[in-house]
Amino acid sequence: MPSTATTARRCRELIESWLADGSFDAMLPEVTRLRGVPQPEQYHAEGDAYTHTLLAADAVPGGADARVFWGVLLHDIGKAETTAFIKGRWRSWGHAEAGAQLVPAAMERLGLGDLAADVAWLVKHHTFHFSWNLAPGVRLSRHQRRFMEHPLFPLLLQVCDADAVGSRGGSDKGMKIGLLVDMLLDEAKG
């Protein structure tokens, strides 16, 4: 892959060319394996994990950092091996961690090994907000504030936002990310 794919726009053009020439499956088998992987309809009315992934990748702004694009495109690759019907619905417990372990091989195959560690971190942490008690008026804990000091945290918010945009249904992902951004701005003001 040419090193010129430094923005989401260039990455998207590359993906579109692979889809057009039929090489996508060979280049990104981790994403291809998401075809037919079910998701709970109440949160993902858009369909399987593959459809969600492409919708989310489409939501990444063209000028975004390439790591955001790859983080979004690979954010759910762990669902292919973790999804199971448990307690009456489809669940993918541990998919973020499982996906993060698959990222280095995918990035090496694409010739982007230098981005692998950052993209793996984004994939591993893309569900962080589900465990946080985010509500208006709630103060962030010291642990949460330290996590937000990670240099990749601004990119992680972009990954989470695209993930939310790519979801159709009753998920509150977008609301949580918006609330977190508001909380960050409030704390920055004092």
Image (tube, rainbow, N blue to C red):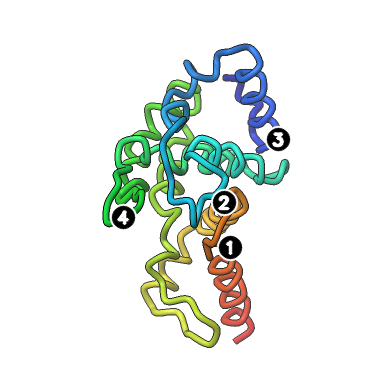
What kind of element bears circle 4? loop
Residue at point 38% right, 32% down? Answer: 104
Instruction: Classify 10 Å Cα crowding around label 1: few (below 14), some (14-19), many (20 and above).
Output: some
Q: Which residue is mark 4?
A: 88
Residue at point 52% right, 61% down? Answer: 171
Instruction: Report the side of 159 relative to 12 (left or right).
Output: left
Q: Earlier in the sequence, mark 1 or mark 2?
A: 2
The front one of 66 and 83 is 83
Residue farthest left in this picture: 86
What kind of element bears circle 1? helix
Q: Are marks 1 and 2 in contact (CB under 8 Å)?
A: yes
Q: Which residue is mark 2?
A: 167
Q: Amino acid at mark 4?
A: Gly
Give the Cα separation between the discs numbered 2 and 3.
21 Å
Q: Earlier in the sequence, mark 4 or mark 2?
A: 4
Q: Amino acid at mark 1?
A: Gly
Give the Cα separation between the discs numbered 4 and 1.
25 Å
Q: Which quadrant holds the N terminus?
A: top right
**Vertical side of 1 occupied by 120: above or below:** below
Q: Which residue is mark 3?
A: 9
